[in-house]
C-alpha cells in the first residue's frame, strides 16, 4: 500500500518564502518572461491590407512603413491589395479577421466619409468593428486650373463660379476631392457643375485638355502637372504651405480657414485586439514615422508625417467621422 504523507508543512514553508520575497521581487522574476514574449511577437507574418490598387499613394506609403518596420522590428509584413467597393471590401475583410494583431488595414479620409455615405451598407462599422492602431501621415487637396485659364486666384474662381457655369472635376462621387468641392460650395455659396471621374488622373487629363474648368485634386496627383507648368495651383487645403510649391497659398490664407482638409492615412485592426498588442503595434509604427528618413520619404510622396498613437488616432478618426457626416448630410451627397 502507498503511504499518505501530509504536505501541509511544505506548503506552509513555501507560503512563508513567497511572503518574504514580496510582490515586487516576484514581478521582477516574471519580467524576463514578459520581455521574451514581446520579443517573439508576432508569431506569424502580418497581413497589411491596402483597400486600393497597388502603386497608389496609400499603397506606396504602406509599403514604406512596412519596410521600415521589417528592418527595425524584424517583423514579416505582407502587403495585400484588396481594392473595390469604395475601399469597403478590404475594410470589411479586416473587420471580420481574427483580433490577434496580425491583420492590419490601411485607411484614408475615404473611410471616415464612408461611415456616413455607406451607413448600414458597408459590411462593417468603422468605429465599432475596427481598432485604431496608429496614424501615419496626411496630404492636402489642391485646387488647380489650366495654366491658360483666366482664373488666377481663389477670388477669381469665386467670381467665375457666381457669374457663369463652371465644370469642376473630381476623382469620383464621395471621394475626398469631391467632399472638398462640396465643402467649398457650402462655405462660399458658389455653384459648380460636379463632373465625377473614375480616379484623379482622368480628371486632370480633361483639365489639361480644356474639357473642364477646375479640379479639386489630391495634392500628390496634381503636383507634377503644376511643377511642369501645364496646370496652375490656386490653393492648398493643408495647414501650411508646401515646400515644393512655396508660392501657393493655403485656404486659410485666402480667407477660407474652414476649408482645411487632410486626406490622412493610418492603420486599423479588427476590434478586440488585446491592449498590450495594440500599444506594441502603435508604438512601433509611430517610432518609425518619427524618423527623419521616413518623414523625408513621405514628403517626397506629397505627405506630411502625422505620427499618432492608438488613443490619439482614435480620437482624431472619430472627429473626422463626425465632421464629414455633417458635410455629407448638409450637401446631400449620394453614392451609387
Image: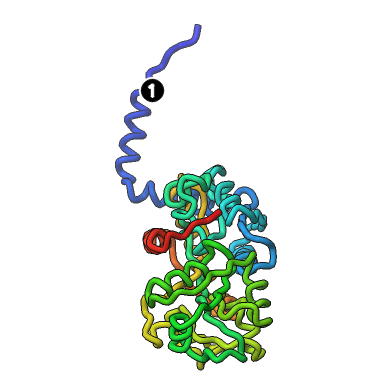
Q: Residue at x 44, y 86 (%)?
A: 159
Within 10 Å of disc 1 (Cα), the crowding (few <14, some 14-19, many 20+) is few
Colour scheme of this structure image? rainbow
Residue that badge 1 annotates: 7
Q: Residue at x 38, y 46 (%)?
A: 26
Q: From the viewer's side, name the closer residue of 8 and 91.
A: 91
Q: Residue at x 42, y 51 (%)?
A: 127
The secondary structure type at the circle numbered 1 is: loop
From the viewer's perspective, tell me whether residue 336 is left or right of residue 228.
left
Q: From the viewer's side, name the closer residue of 55 and 202.
A: 202
| Tally of numbered tags | 1
Q: From the viewer's side, name the closer residue of 121 and 11.
A: 121
Q: From the viewer's perspective, is residue 165 above or below residue 278? A: below
From the viewer's perspective, tell me whether residue 115 is left or right of residue 98.
left
- Residue 33 location (% of width, % of height): 50, 49
- Residue 199 location (% of width, % of height): 63, 67
Q: Is any atom of residue 316 visible in this view?
A: no
- Residue 77 location (% of width, % of height): 64, 57
Rendered image quadrant of residue 230: bottom right
Q: From the viewer's perspective, is residue 210 above or below residue 279? A: below
Q: From the viewer's side, name the closer residue of 9 and 102.
A: 102
Q: Residue at x 47, y 55 (%)?
A: 117
Amino acid at each position: 500500500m502507498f503511504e499518505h504523507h501530509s504536505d501541509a508543512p511544505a506548503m506552509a514553508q513555501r507560503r512563508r518564502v513567497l511572503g518574504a520575497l514580496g510582490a515586487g521581487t516576484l514581478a521582477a522574476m516574471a519580467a524576463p518572461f514578459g520581455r521574451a514574449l514581446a520579443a517573439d511577437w508576432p508569431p506569424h507574418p502580418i497581413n497589411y491590407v491596402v483597400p486600393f490598387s497597388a502603386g497608389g499613394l496609400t499603397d506606396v506609403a504602406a509599403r514604406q512603413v512596412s519596410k521600415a518596420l521589417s528592418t527595425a522590428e524584424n517583423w514579416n509584413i505582407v502587403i495585400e491589395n484588396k481594392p473595390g467597393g469604395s475601399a469597403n471590401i478590404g475594410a470589411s475583410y479586416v473587420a471580420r479577421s481574427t483580433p490577434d494583431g496580425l491583420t492590419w488595414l490601411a485607411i484614408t479620409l475615404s473611410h471616415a466619409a464612408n461611415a456616413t455615405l455607406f451607413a448600414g451598407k458597408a459590411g462593417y462599422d468603422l468605429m465599432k468593428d475596427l481598432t485604431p492602431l496608429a496614424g501615419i501621415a496626411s496630404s492636402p487637396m489642391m485646387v488647380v486650373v489650366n495654366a491658360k485659364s483666366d482664373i488666377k486666384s481663389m477670388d477669381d474662381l469665386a467670381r467665375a463660379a457666381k457669374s457663369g457655369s463652371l465644370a469642376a472635376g473630381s476623382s469620383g462621387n464621395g471621394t475626398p476631392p469631391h467632399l472638398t468641392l462640396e465643402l467649398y460650395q457650402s462655405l462660399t455659396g458658389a455653384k459648380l457643375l460636379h463632373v465625377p471621374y473614375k480616379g484623379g488622373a482622368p480628371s486632370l487629363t480633361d483639365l489639361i485638355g480644356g474639357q473642364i474648368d477646375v479640379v479639386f485634386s489630391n495634392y500628390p496627383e496634381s503636383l507634377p502637372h503644376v511643377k511642369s507648368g501645364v496646370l496652375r495651383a490656386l490653393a492648398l487645403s493643408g495647414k501650411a504651405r508646401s515646400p515644393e510649391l512655396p508660392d501657393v497659398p493655403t485656404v486659410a490664407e485666402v480667407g477660407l480657414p474652414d476649408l482645411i482638409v487632410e486626406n490622412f492615412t493610418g492603420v486599423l485592426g479588427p476590434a478586440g485586439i488585446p491592449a498590450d498588442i495594440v500599444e506594441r503595434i502603435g508604438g512601433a509604427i509611430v517610432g518609425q514615422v518619427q524618423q527623419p528618413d521616413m518623414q523625408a520619404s513621405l514628403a517626397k510622396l506629397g505627405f506630411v508625417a502625422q505620427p499618432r498613437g492608438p488613443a490619439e488616432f482614435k480620437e482624431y478618426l472619430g472627429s473626422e467621422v463626425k465632421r464629414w457626416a455633417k458635410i455629407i448630410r448638409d450637401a446631400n451627397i449620394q453614392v451609387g
